[in-house]
Image (cartoon, grey):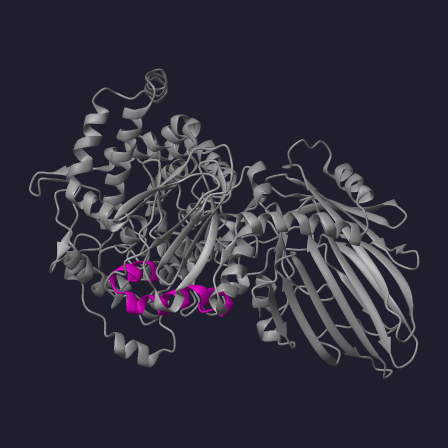
């Protein structure tokens, strides 16, 4: 493993799903898992190809109930390329002797290489080397080069290449009882000699999908179409020491593509015009070079290598090609079928990174949310509220896609799922709107779509707040916070909790920001927005009042996760750690025992502590002050200690947030959590979940931990604010960023020194503000500053 290569040596069926996910190749429009082309989907292998925004809705019967789910569709498999001795069995690592096996991803070039040595039953040794790319310059193309070399004596080899439309969504075991046949009307045919095609459509969303494949080999390929499979076959004559190459180039189009008429004709035309593999490689490498320059990060050692892998997968899911699409942030990337490809709040952990490198992608992702604003307003009306209620899970059109039942694999029981009560997703969207505008300086978006979303989300929070005369405070009842373990009070008949601290504080922040936007809008635009939103004259006054009076519960001198949290029982953490190897999913363990985590002071992931992730210490203290509470360093430190001791880290986001918090609150422990966040997917710490798709928010969050967390970087009031935290285990690092029209601004910290370099341009200088001084760095200038080390 190096910073530029991610490599696996040897063949281990138990690791294959993990490797497939981490060796996925994509371009922001579609991605294909790193499965071996000669292997079909089974208990070991799962080839999958997914296009951003390609969903389909099916109904299943679960526990006697009809349940509707919308899934990101597993598209026809373009990978199949298998081989055998004439009349023999097809060779795979599971059925033939493997002499050696290596699989590696060249991160710099976006290339997957595999080399496998097979021993044939006739005594020869067959070496198979493959190079695969999903084209980053032309986002409709992918290619597979296969090189065969025989050792011992000459041999004939039959090769079969195919496009397979007989695929299902079956990549997640716990969904196995759900309907997964999303494709229908599968047809195949031949376009030209050497070129075949496959077309189909999704069953309910009626998305037309077309693939065309061109096979280039020393001998002409013969077509041998089968039901739902476009097949090409060729027989190769192998001579010892002489490598024979077979290239497979494919084009993928759907009816969701921009400027599309007939996806099939578009796919055939594109693959026919595509150059050979070597010629395809050059612009693909150039496109990756450009991405790496814009997203440059320089961190030494193993941490740097993993961060580069994380960045690689972020760029493959959300590249500049994504900016041309109407899609959101799939929580598990385009890497698998976990969470059904749905969009959650994970963009909260992704957009802050993208804002400073690919603002056009951030803007497009926020446009996706704005296009679904009317649906969110309808959802609010359905529960008797004004404003916008965005869904906890969404897919194609912005309706709530959160399942009503979920399976506990430990008990085998289907249980009610109340996570749709996580209304705080609206605050996450508002936060991303604000952060994007501050980082990019995009006044047009801030004044139009951004303002509209902020106003409607603020309106929802104001309308959700009810006055409690006894407390003299406004309250928000019946919600679920980021800690999904707690969804009801012990023994309660109805789900939901009152006054979740994270929900209420972020709601107060949204209300304050919406008021600020209204105040700063140009008068003509303010009038338009007020008219369009039918904003009553008394509404801003109510927002002001609610933003200062929302209830934040405390107990024992710390912030309570929700009202009544302090009355819950303490869990015997030592006993559960002793009895179970892994207690990350404590909720499943307790439910299988006939108990409920709702009874205990036990969290899945950061909830209250998320406030320290979103807001700098100064901003957080100001927020609590606005709400009439004192939040000093001592109260915050006690709060951190309390929840740190009572969190099972059942989410990959948990280590990330705790590492971020501890970098400032208790530096000595921050590194262990940072490492957990880094290793979450590469070591599959959640126990098999990475094979179902990577955790995109956690990957982007580790990048942002270096970019903003350790540097204290904020973009506000037209300046870059920096308050670096010295971390002994990471004393030297650097990155480049894009800030308000300045491309390639370089920031580097090393041995207590901060260096900021602004490339030459016609832009204005950048104001850089540190705790003890302000400097102005103009285009073409480099500023080197000596930092004062704070207390450990």
- Residue 454, horizontal then vertical, whole percent: 34, 33
Q: Quadrant of the N terminus?
A: bottom right
Q: Magenta span covers which residues? A: 659-686
Q: Is residue 649 magenta?
A: no
User: Which residue sits furthest bottom?
Assistant: 123
Location of residue 519 with respect to 60 vertically, above or below: above
Judge whether residue 665 is colored magenta. Answer: yes
Q: Quadrant of the C terminus?
A: bottom left
Q: Which residue does the image show at 76% across and 76% down from the upper left?
A: 117
Q: Is residue 385 visible?
A: no
Residue 82 point in image, percent of width and height: 78, 65
At horizontal 31% and vertical 29% (from top left) the residue drawn is 517
Which quarter of the picture shows residue 654? bottom left
Q: Residue at x 42, y 42 (%)?
A: 400
Q: Nearer the viewer, residue 325 or 777?
A: 777
The image quadrant of residue 238 is bottom right
Indicate the position of residue 195 as horizontal and vertical percent values: 84, 48
Image label count = 0
Is 388 placed above or below 655 here? above
Could you say which is closer to the camera, residue 723 or residue 190?
723
| Observer-nearest of 528 and 213 | 528
| Residue 189 visible in the snapshot | yes
Q: Position of residue 451 (x, y in %)?
A: 36, 29
At 38% from the left and 78% from the top, the residue drawn is 581
Magenta part, dominant SS = helix
Asked if residue 210 is positioned above or below residue 155 in the image, the reply reads: above
- Residue furthest to the left in view is 470
707 or 420: which is nearer to us?
A: 707
């Amino acid at each position: 493993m190096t910073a530029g290569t991610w490599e696996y040596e040897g063949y281990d069926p138990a690791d294959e799903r993990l490797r497939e996910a981490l060796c996925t190749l994509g371009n922001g429009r579609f991605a294909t898992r790193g499965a071996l082309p000669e292997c079909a989907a089974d208990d070991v292998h799962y080839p999958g190809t997914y296009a951003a925004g390609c969903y389909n809705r099916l109904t299943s019967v679960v526990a006697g109930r009809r349940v509707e789910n919308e899934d990101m569709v597993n598209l026809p498999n373009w990978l199949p390329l298998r081989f055998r001795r004439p009349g023999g069995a097809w060779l795979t690592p599971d059925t033939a002797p493997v002499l050696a096996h290596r699989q590696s991803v060249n991160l710099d070039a976006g290339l997957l290489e595999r080399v496998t040595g097979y021993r044939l039953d006739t005594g020869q040794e067959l070496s198979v080397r493959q190079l695969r790319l999903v084209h980053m310059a032309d986002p409709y193309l992918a290619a597979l080069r296969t090189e065969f070399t025989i050792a011992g004596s000459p041999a004939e080899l039959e090769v079969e290449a195919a496009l397979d439309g007989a695929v299902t969504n079956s990549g997640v075991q716990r969904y196995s009882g759900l309907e997964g046949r999303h494709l229908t009307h599968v047809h195949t045919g031949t376009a030209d000699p050497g070129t075949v095609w496959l077309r189909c459509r999704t069953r309910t969303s009626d998305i037309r999908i077309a693939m065309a494949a061109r096979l280039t080999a020393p001998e002409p390929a013969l077509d041998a179409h089968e039901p739902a499979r476009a097949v090409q076959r060729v027989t190769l004559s192998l001579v010892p020491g002489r490598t024979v190459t077979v290239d497979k180039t494919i084009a993928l189009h759907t009816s969701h593509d921009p400027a599309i008429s007939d996806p099939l004709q578009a796919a055939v035309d594109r693959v026919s015009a595509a150059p050979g593999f070597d010629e395809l490689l050059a612009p693909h490498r150039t496109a990756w070079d450009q991405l790496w320059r814009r997203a440059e990060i320089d961190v030494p050692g193993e941490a740097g290598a993993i961060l580069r892998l994380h960045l690689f997968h972020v760029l493959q899911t959300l590249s500049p090609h994504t900016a041309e699409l109407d899609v959101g942030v799939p929580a598990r990337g385009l890497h698998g079928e976990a969470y059904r490809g749905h969009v959650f709040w994970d963009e909260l952990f992704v957009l802050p990174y993208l804002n400073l490198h690919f603002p056009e992608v951030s803007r497009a992702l926020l446009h996706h949310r704005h296009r679904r604003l009317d649906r969110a307003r309808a959802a609010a009306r359905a529960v008797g509220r004004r404003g916008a209620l965005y869904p906890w899970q969404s897919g194609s059109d912005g309706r709530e896609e959160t399942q009503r039942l979920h399976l506990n694999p430990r008990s085998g029981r289907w249980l009610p799922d109340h996570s749709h009560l996580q209304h705080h997703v609206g605050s996450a969207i508002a936060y991303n709107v604000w952060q994007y505008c501050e980082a990019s300086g995009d006044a047009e978006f801030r004044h139009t779509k951004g303002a509209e979303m902020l106003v409607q989300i603020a309106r929802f929070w104001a309308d959700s707040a009810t006055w409690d005369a006894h407390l003299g405070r406004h309250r928000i009842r019946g919600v679920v916070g980021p800690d999904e373990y707690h969804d009801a009070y012990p023994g309660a008949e109805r789900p939901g909790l009152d006054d979740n601290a994270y929900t209420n504080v972020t709601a107060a922040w949204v209300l304050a920001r919406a008021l600020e936007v209204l105040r700063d809008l140009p008068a003509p635009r303010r009038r338009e927005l007020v008219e369009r939103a039918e904003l009553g004259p008394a509404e801003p006054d109510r927002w002001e009042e609610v933003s200062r009076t929302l209830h934040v519960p405390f107990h024992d001198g710390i912030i309570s996760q929700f009202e009544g949290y302090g009355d819950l029982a303490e869990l015997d953490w030592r006993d559960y750690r002793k009895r179970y190897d892994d207690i990350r999913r404590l909720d499943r363990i307790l439910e299988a025992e006939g108990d409920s985590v709702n009874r205990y002071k036990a969290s899945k992931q950061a909830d209250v502590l998320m406030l320290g992730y979103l807001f700098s210490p100064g901003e957080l203290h100001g927020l609590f002050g606005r709400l009439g509470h004192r939040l000093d360093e001592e109260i915050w430190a006690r709060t951190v200690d309390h929840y740190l001791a009572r969190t099972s880290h059942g989410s990959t986001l948990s280590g990330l947030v705790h590492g971020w918090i501890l970098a400032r609150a208790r530096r000595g422990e921050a590194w262990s959590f940072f490492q957990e966040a880094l290793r979450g997917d590469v070591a599959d710490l959640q126990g098999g979940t990475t094979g179902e798709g990577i955790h995109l928010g956690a990957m982007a969050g580790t990048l942002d931990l270096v970019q903003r967390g350790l540097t204290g970087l904020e973009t506000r009031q037209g300046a870059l604010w920096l308050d670096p935290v010295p971390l002994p285990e990471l004393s030297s690092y650097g990155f480049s960023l894009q800030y308000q029209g300045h491309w390639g601004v370089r920031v580097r910290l090393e041995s207590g020194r901060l260096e900021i370099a602004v490339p030459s341009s016609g832009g204005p200088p950048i104001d850089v503000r540190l705790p003890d001084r302000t400097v102005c760095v103009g285009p073409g200038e480099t500023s080197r500053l000596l930092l004062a080390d704070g207390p450990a």
